[in-house]
Image (tube, rainbow, N blue to C red):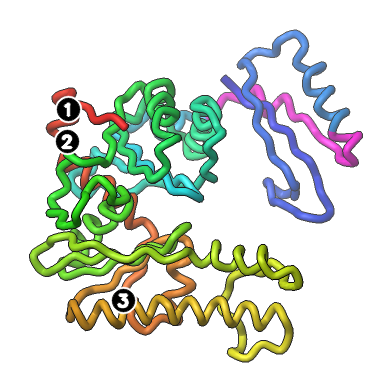
């Protein structure tokens, strides 16, 4: 299999490809030998782009050039695909299990969560991401999923079977985590919150407080006996800002960032300052109270806005962008024998 390369130059937004710059670089699989109609197909694409005000060049000689052997064909790997399904994003990470107990994270990606997408749509997106990293679906020997979006469970179950030919391990009650859960109804606990606690304890010990900046911002507490005590759930920073925009007709939608000054000199600056420092105050206010009850606890933050908020927080000690993926790896390893015996969990 070779690649047809379509390069679309642009004067506005440039992307470097070799010694030229292009807006768009698309690869189309074609046979290693020229096929009848190839030129017609790519000619139609070029015409459509021309009508859109762009030009395209086709390099068939490059398309037919023998490709280098991808790294996955020369190295024996056993890979674990970890998937964290949130209300806003789906995060995927690939771990190399052949490296032993501390399997490294090879690569990770973030997709938008959509309840309307099918298993095939998620499959095609995943295959494209794998291709970009010279990975093959056949290398994925195991798959672990945490999800807080129940409508997507059957979709992802089908996706795992169809595109990776594996049964996923779902993070749910009954899965071995090494953490005692003391809340009233453990089945209500979001899988991502439990996973974060497992990863945090592994790296920083207990007592521990994890803060996850997602659609909602969650605070989770583990005592010095490594018992999960519960936590707090607050509206996420992004949805708080969006609610302000939706309900106040004269206020614009703004970028969430740390403002240059506390007192804003226009509407946008005033909103940025109020939203940002108001949220930092919320986070530090909750953490201050938690640290009084659990002195000496390490505070670990994760999630999309963790780095932005932590720089202004007085109480966040560490930021771990891959905390949830690392927790999924740890839980899979703790259930490895169960998985290898063929016992499965289902959503």
Q: Along the horizontal axis of the image, is 289 left or right of 308?
A: left
Residue at the spot 68% in from the left edge and 27% down from the top edge: 4
Quarter holding residue 153: top left
Marks 1 & 2, CB-CB < 8 Å contact: yes
| Whether residue 77 can be seen here | no
Q: Position of residue 54 (x, y in %)?
A: 86, 40
Q: Position of residue 68 (x, y in %)?
A: 51, 30
Q: Secondary structure at mark 2?
A: helix
Mark 3 vs mark 1, CA separation in Å: 37 Å
The correct choice, above or below, for 232 with respect to 315 in the image is above
Residue located beneath label 1 in the image? 340
Residue located beneath label 2 in the image? 336
Quarter holding residue 197: bottom left
Residue located beneath label 3 in the image? 317
Q: Along the horizontal axis of the image, is 202 left or right of 219?
A: left
| Whether residue 3 can be seen here | yes
Residue at the spot 44% in from the left edge and 60% down from the top edge: 216
The correct choice, above or below, for 152 with respect to 60 in the image is below
Mark 1 vs mark 2, CA separation in Å: 6 Å
Q: Residue furthest top?
A: 36
Name the residue nearer the viewer: 209 or 57: 209
- Which segment did they paint magenta? 49-67
Q: Position of residue 241 (x, y in %)?
A: 59, 68
Mark 3 vs mark 2, CA separation in Å: 32 Å
Crowd rating for badge 3 (residues with CA inside 10 Å; few <14, some 14–19, many 20+) = few
Q: Along the horizontal axis of the image, is 325 left or right of 132?
A: left
Looking at the image, tell me whether mark 3 or mark 2 is earlier in sequence order: 3
Q: Secondary structure at mark 3?
A: loop
Q: Along the horizontal axis of the image, is 314 left or right of 109?
A: left
């Amino acid at each position: 299999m070779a690649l047809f390369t379509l390069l679309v130059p642009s004067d506005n937004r440039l992307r470097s490809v070799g010694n030229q710059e292009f807006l768009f670089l698309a690869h189309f699989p074609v046979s290693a030998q020229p096929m009848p109609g190839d030129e017609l197909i790519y000619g139609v694409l070029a015409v459509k782009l021309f009508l859109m005000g762009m030009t395209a060049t086709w390099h068939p000689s490059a398309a037919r050039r023998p490709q280098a052997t991808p790294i996955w064909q020369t190295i024996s790997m056993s890979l674990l695909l970890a998937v964290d399904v949130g209300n806003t994003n789906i995060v995927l990470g690939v771990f190399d299990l052949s490296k032993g107990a501390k399997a490294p994270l090879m690569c990770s990606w973030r997709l938008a969560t959509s309840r309307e997408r099918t298993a095939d749509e998620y499959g095609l997106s995943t295959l494209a991401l794998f291709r970009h990293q010279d990975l093959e679906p056949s290398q994925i020997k195991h798959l672990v999923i945490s999800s807080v979006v129940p409508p997507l469970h059957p979709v992802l179950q089908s996706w795992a079977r169809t595109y990776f030919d594996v049964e996923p391990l779902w993070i749910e009650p009954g899965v071995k985590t090494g953490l005692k859960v003391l809340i009233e109804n453990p089945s209500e606990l979001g899988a991502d919150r439990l996973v974060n606690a497992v990863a945090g304890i592994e790296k920083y010990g207990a007592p521990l407080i994890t803060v996850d900046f997602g659609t909602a911002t969650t605070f989770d507490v583990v005592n010095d006996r490594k018992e999960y005590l519960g936590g707090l759930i607050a509206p996420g920073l992004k949805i708080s800002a969006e609610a302000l925009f939706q309900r106040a007709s004269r206020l614009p939608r703004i970028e969430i960032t740390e403002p240059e000054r506390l007192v804003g000199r226009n509407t946008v600056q005033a909103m940025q300052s109020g939203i940002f420092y108001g949220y930092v105050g919320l986070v530090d206010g909750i953490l201050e109270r938690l640290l009084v009850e659990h002195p000496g606890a390490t505070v670990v933050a994760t999630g999309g806005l963790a780095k932005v908020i932590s720089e202004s927080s007085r109480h966040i000690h560490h930021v771990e962008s891959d905390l949830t993926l690392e927790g999924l790896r740890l839980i899979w390893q703790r259930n490895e024998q169960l998985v290898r015996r063929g016992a499965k969990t289902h959503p």
